[in-house]
Amino acid sequence: MRAEPFACAWLDTKQDRTDKVVLTANTDHWNKERGPHLERVVFHNDIPPAEALNLVCDTEGEVDIVTEISPADAERVASSEHAEVHAIDAMRVILGIVNRGVEDAPLNDARTRRALNMAVDRDRMVREGFGGYAYPAAGVTPPYAVGGQSSLEPYPHDPEGAKQLLQDAGWPEGRALRLATLADLEGVANMFAEDLRASLGIEVEVTAIPNEELLAAQHALVEKVMPLPFDVLMFPWIDLTSDAPAAFMHGELYGETGPFRAGPPVEKFEELMGEFAVQVDAGRQGELSAEIDRLVYDEALSVFLLYPQALYAVNKHVDFVGFATTFELAETRATEEHWSRRNGA
């Protein structure tokens, strides 16, 4: 990012994995109250997702948990003989990263960005795109975050108001909006594009980035050397902690050194993040997180779309406890009816 300490970014790279990873419980751990509750956990990296879903739904003894199932598969899991759906309120958001550096369209004008937010029918997107396993987004921070909660409401779906704002901002006649997305989100991106066309009366060009080109596209966004080939990028983002959302979610998206910032730095944002970075009082840190979220909401620095739930297919005899941030099994148990206990395994 820059020739300074602490100004770097981590990008996904393809890595070879072993077929299986086996975790064995440490029965001598001091925290007996917490566990362990499982003797052994085997992570399978050698089973394709579709096959794993078949195994957890239709059989016992091969797969007990499948992570990150899609909303499209949730109904099948819920009606299966051996598995059930666990929907976890996760620290995740799907938003539109707005390229505020575009020179031939007024995307650096907050009126344009508010128009994009008001053009979206989030309730339809939740219902039809995610089968109900998501919440309409207001800002970056989900309402169930431990730190930085705020009273923000999603932008209203107001096609007429959105169209007027776009006209006031001076959107060029005949200029199409370039919407890019990841391959896994192409269906939802098309719904988003339909809303933009219907509400704003402009053409929208949708480009889905193939998985094999994703790393190169990430580099282009992070390095910020070449002009970006999109106006809005539909992007899924996560948090690695539930009690200080601004530290990871907002900083990566909007900070001066944020890898996913698309447009010039925002002075007020930098001031708030600077105070947040040195704040040691948890209460004040939460207040600052809420202030930061309100700032990006008021300025509509992104198009705030959805907070998707994390979905798991879990054997009916596994007492699964999910977490908002990471996948871990510290609190998960196998019941007396689980195949491993019935068979004395």
Image (cartoon, helix red, strand yellow):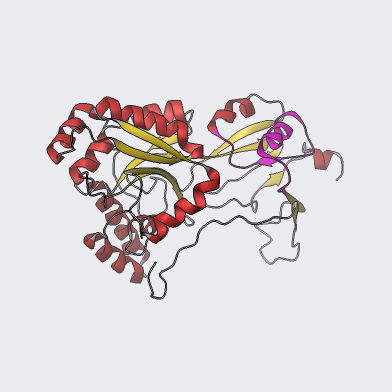
State the quadrant of the C terminus.
top right
Q: Position of residue 148 (x, y in %)?
A: 35, 54
Q: Position of residue 82 (x, y in %)?
A: 72, 30
Query: Which residue is nearer to you in this view: 342 or 324?
Result: 324
Vertical comparison of 178 with 325: above or below: above
Residue shown at the point (50%, 39%) measured from the top left: 183
- Whether residue 316 appears in this view of the structure is no
Query: Which residue is nearer to you in this view: 102 or 132?
Result: 102
277 displayed left or right of 268:
right
Q: Is residue 47 magenta?
A: yes
88 displayed left or right of 165:
right
From which residue to which does the magenta span run?
A: 44-70
The residue furthest left is 168
- Whether residue 273 appears in this view of the structure is yes
Q: Position of residue 307 (x, y in %)?
A: 42, 41
Residue shown at the point (27%, 51%) measured from the top left: 296
Q: Quadrant of residue 165?
A: top left
Vertical comparison of 202 with 295: above or below: above
Q: Position of residue 6 (x, y in %)?
A: 42, 72
Vertical comparison of 242 with 60: above or below: below
Q: Is residue 253 magenta?
A: no
Query: Which residue is nearer to you in this view: 50 or 137?
Result: 50
20 displayed left or right of 320:
right
The residue furthest right is 344
Residue shown at the point (36%, 60%) measured from the top left: 225
Vertical comparison of 299 with 193: above or below: below
